[in-house]
Amino acid sequence: MKNSAYIYKLLSEIPDPEIPVISIVELGVVREVSIAGDTSIEVKLTPTYSGCPAMKQMEDDVRKKLKEDGFEEIKLSIVYNPPWTTDWLSAEAKLKLQKYGIAPPEESTTDKSFLTGKHKSITCPRCKSKNTVMISQFGSTACKALYQCKDCLEAFDYFKCI
């Protein structure tokens, strides 16, 4: 029997298009699953931010995965409220980001230091040094900032607290 847990497990096989080391479920964009019968389903997704260019790919990947599993009637809804937050990233997802070379968010969304221009020290995902500096508020994607470690001299992305 296909239940919500089964669908979440199925969707957890879909990698984030921009950060393939974590799934869209681990990222927290899969908000709700509603199954009606054996072939009808609705999935609600929340983008990481309103202009996220990866959303179309995520929608296509969800639709494809569900069709492969036998669903014929698939409704995808984009939900903006409540807005996505980095607080929805699991501890496991943060560890995967770090191993991949992306510094995970270190604070909760209550940390708004980026708004005041006060840049905090972010832990380097490679050598674990806190001796880092922001190079650019924008990294490889809009949800990341570019930092450099002053100890190992490596540049790295930091997944901003949103």
Image (cartoon, grey):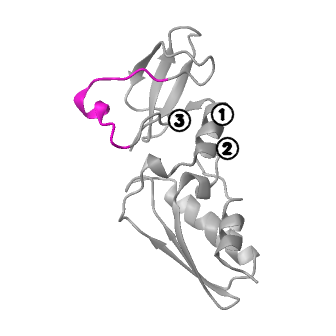
For the residues labelled 2 and 1, say whether their Cβ atoms are less than 8 Å apart: yes
Q: Foreground mark, 1 or 3?
A: 3
Mark 3, secondary structure of its residue: loop
- Tell me how far mark 3 sits from mark 2, CA to CA: 13 Å
Which residue is identified by label 2? 21
Nearer the N terminus, badge 2 or badge 1? 2
* Left or right relative to 114: residue 8: right
Mark 1, secondary structure of its residue: helix
Q: Which residues are magenta?
A: 109-122
* Left or right relative to 48: residue 95: right
Q: Amino acid at mark 2?
A: Val
- Tell me how far mark 1 sits from mark 3, CA to CA: 10 Å
Which residue is identified by label 1? 100
On the image, the x and y values in percent for residue 49 come to 40, 53
Q: Amino acid at mark 1?
A: Tyr
Q: Quadrant of residue 93?
A: top right
User: Foreground: 24 or 111?
Assistant: 111
| Residue farthest along the left direction in this orientation | 116
- Residue at position x 75%, y 82% from top? 70
Mark 2, secondary structure of its residue: loop
Residue 1: which numbered mark, if any?
Answer: none
User: Foreground: 35 or 59?
Assistant: 35
Above/below status of 53 relative to 160: below
Decide if residue 19 is in sight here.
no
Q: Foreground mark, 3 or 2?
A: 3
Which residue is identified by label 3? 104
Above/below status of 19 relative to 7: above
| Residue farthest along the bottom direction in this orientation | 37
Main secondary-structure element of the magenta-colored stretch: loop
On the image, the x and y values in percent for residue 31 come to 50, 66
- Tell me how far mark 2 sits from mark 1, CA to CA: 7 Å
